[in-house]
Image (tube, rainbow, N blue to C red):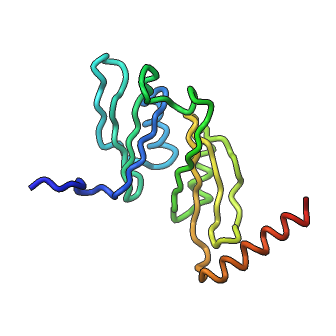
């Protein structure tokens, strides 16, 4: 029996559009520790119309830009409105590894009011990644109080 959600998939699976999928796959495997599961070349014989990677317990797709249609990369669009979030065991090690591999630092790793040690990078293909390790569990009330305090501190500094 065919299942509507394939085995080993979660309900949502990101699909990243990039210029140069082969380079992107190499970067995601070396910088983030992803494993390439497979790739499928487009009929033109040059672009990759589908590749599947596994990062931790989550799969994501990486496809070449097809600018003649709706598949445009952040490089063509001038940026992205999406940030992919990774929870990892050692945020500092993962962040440093990604930066050493060519990521641009958007926000240095630091302890945040919401209980994560957190930083943000842009990969060489224009996609943003936030990387975090949970360092403290909080109740919704504690989180709300810290958010209010954080906002108040920012307002006082401006």
Residue 29, percent from left and from top: 44, 43
Residue under the point 42% across and 28% down: 64
Report the number of numbered marks: 0
Q: Residue at x 30, y 26 (%)?
A: 41
- Screen quadrant of the N terminus: bottom left
- In the rendered image of this protein, does residue 61 appear above or below residue 130? above
Residue 91: quadrant of the picture: bottom right
**Identity of the residue furthest to the top in this view:** 44
Residue placed most toward the observer, 18 or 156: 156
Q: Position of residue 87 (x, y in %)?
A: 51, 62
Tell me the residue at 62%/51% (across/down).
Answer: 96
Residue 57, quarter of picture: bottom left
Q: Position of residue 4 (x, y in %)?
A: 21, 54
State which quarter of the image contains the C terminus: bottom right
- Judge from the rendering whether residue 44 lies leftward or rightward of residue 55; answer left or right: left
| Outermost residue to the right | 157
Is residue 56 found left or right of 105 in the rendered image? Answer: left
Image point 63% across, 47% down: which residue?
121
User: In this orientation, which residue lies closer to the viewer: 137 or 97?
Assistant: 137
Of 149 and 8, the residue lying toward us: 149
Residue found at the far front of this picture = 70
Q: Is residue 59 above or below residue 68?
A: below
Q: Is residue 151 above or below residue 73?
A: below
Q: Position of residue 68 (x, y in %)?
A: 43, 19
The answer to whether 36 is drawn above or below residue 63 in the figure is below
């Amino acid at each position: 029996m065919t299942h509507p959600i394939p085995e080993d998939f979660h309900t949502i699976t990101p699909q990243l559009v990039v210029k140069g999928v082969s380079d992107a796959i190499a970067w995601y495997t070396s910088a983030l520790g992803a494993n390439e599961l497979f790739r499928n070349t487009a009929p033109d014989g040059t672009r990759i119309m589908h590749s599947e990677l596994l990062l931790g317990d989550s799969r994501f797709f990486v496809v070449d830009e097809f600018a003649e249609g709706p598949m445009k990369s952040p490089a063509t669009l001038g940026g992205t409105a999406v940030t992919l979030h990774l929870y990892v065991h050692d945020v500092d090690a993962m962040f440093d590894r990604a930066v050493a591999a060519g990521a641009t630092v958007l926000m240095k790793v630091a302890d945040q009011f919401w209980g994560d040690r957190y930083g943000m990078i842009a990969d060489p293909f224009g996609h943003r990644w936030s990387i975090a390790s949970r360092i403290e569990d909080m109740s919704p009330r504690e989180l709300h109080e810290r958010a209010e305090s954080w906002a108040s501190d920012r307002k006082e500094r401006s």
